[in-house]
Image (cartoon, grey):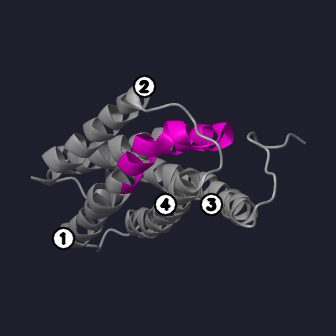
């Protein structure tokens, strides 16, 4: 059941990215735009929080793959937690972000694209880790190099997702405060 569920989440994230083309064009900083940006800030914060949680569980799994005495149940427990976080936390937040993506400033649209891409890779590698674990029947997980590689990749993708969402959240929050205060804010992110 887990294998199918995580694989479905990966496909669902791909499907989410295709919805963007049908969204409406960007608006000026009206009350409606500020409300949309406020919701986007909340969704980005949710992505960041969930990515940190996924990183924790993936990190624990990476540590556990170095120990021959850890049960398969312990690995299943952390993989199930990752599955739930992806399906119940990342997917809904990213779906909502892509729903409003065209209404967001250009820099935020790019951040959403990066978060979706990182989340898709994370989900795909989590699915692959589960499959590699199941296909290595009889082989201790500490010796299953394919499983260990996928877990390592999940750790890396979770870290990338945290980094992207943290930066987007910090900048978006400041941008939103300026908009709410009536300050003129640039539509694109400043370059350095």
Pointers 1 and 4 in contact (CB under 8 A)?
no
Q: CA distance from mark 1 to mark 4?
A: 38 Å
Q: Which residues are magenta?
A: 93-115
Q: Quadrant of the C terminus?
A: top right
Question: How many marks on residues?
Answer: 4
Q: Main secondary structure of the magenta part?
A: helix
Q: Residue at x 53, y 43 (%)?
A: 112
Instruction: Please tell me which residue lies in front, 150 or 20.
Output: 20
Instruction: Please tell me which residue lies in front, 84 or 153.
Output: 84
The reply to whether residue 27 is in sight is: yes
Identify the element where label 3 is drawn.
helix
* Residue beneath disc 1: 73
Instruction: Please tell me which residue lies in front, 158 or 11.
Output: 11
Q: Residue at x 51, y 54 (%)?
A: 36
The reply to whether residue 145 is in sight is: no
* Residue beneath disc 2: 21
Q: Position of residue 113 (x, y in %)?
A: 53, 37
Q: Nearer the viewer, mark 1 or mark 2?
A: 2
* Residue beneath disc 4: 39
Identify the element where label 1 is drawn.
helix
* Residue beneath disc 3: 169
């Amino acid at each position: 059941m887990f294998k199918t569920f995580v694989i479905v989440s990966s496909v669902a994230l791909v499907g989410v990215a295709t919805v963007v083309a049908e969204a409406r064009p960007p608006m000026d900083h009206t009350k409606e735009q500020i409300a949309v940006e406020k919701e986007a800030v909340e969704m980005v914060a949710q992505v960041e929080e969930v990515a940190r949680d996924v990183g924790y569980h993936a990190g624990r799994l990476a540590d556990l793959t170095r120990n021959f005495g850890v049960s398969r149940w312990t690995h299943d427990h952390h993989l199930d937690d990752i599955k739930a976080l992806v399906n119940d936390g990342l997917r809904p937040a990213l779906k909502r972000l892509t729903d409003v993506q065209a209404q967001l400033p250009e820099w935020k649209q790019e951040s959403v694209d990066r978060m979706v891409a990182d989340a898709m890779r994370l989900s795909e590698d989590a699915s692959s880790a589960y499959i590699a674990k199941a296909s290595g029947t009889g082989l201790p997980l500490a010796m299953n190099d394919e499983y260990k590689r996928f877990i390592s990749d999940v750790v890396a993708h979770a870290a990338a997702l945290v980094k992207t969402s943290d930066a987007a959240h910090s900048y978006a929050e400041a941008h939103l405060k300026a908009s709410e205060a009536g300050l003129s804010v640039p539509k694109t992110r400043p370059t350095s």
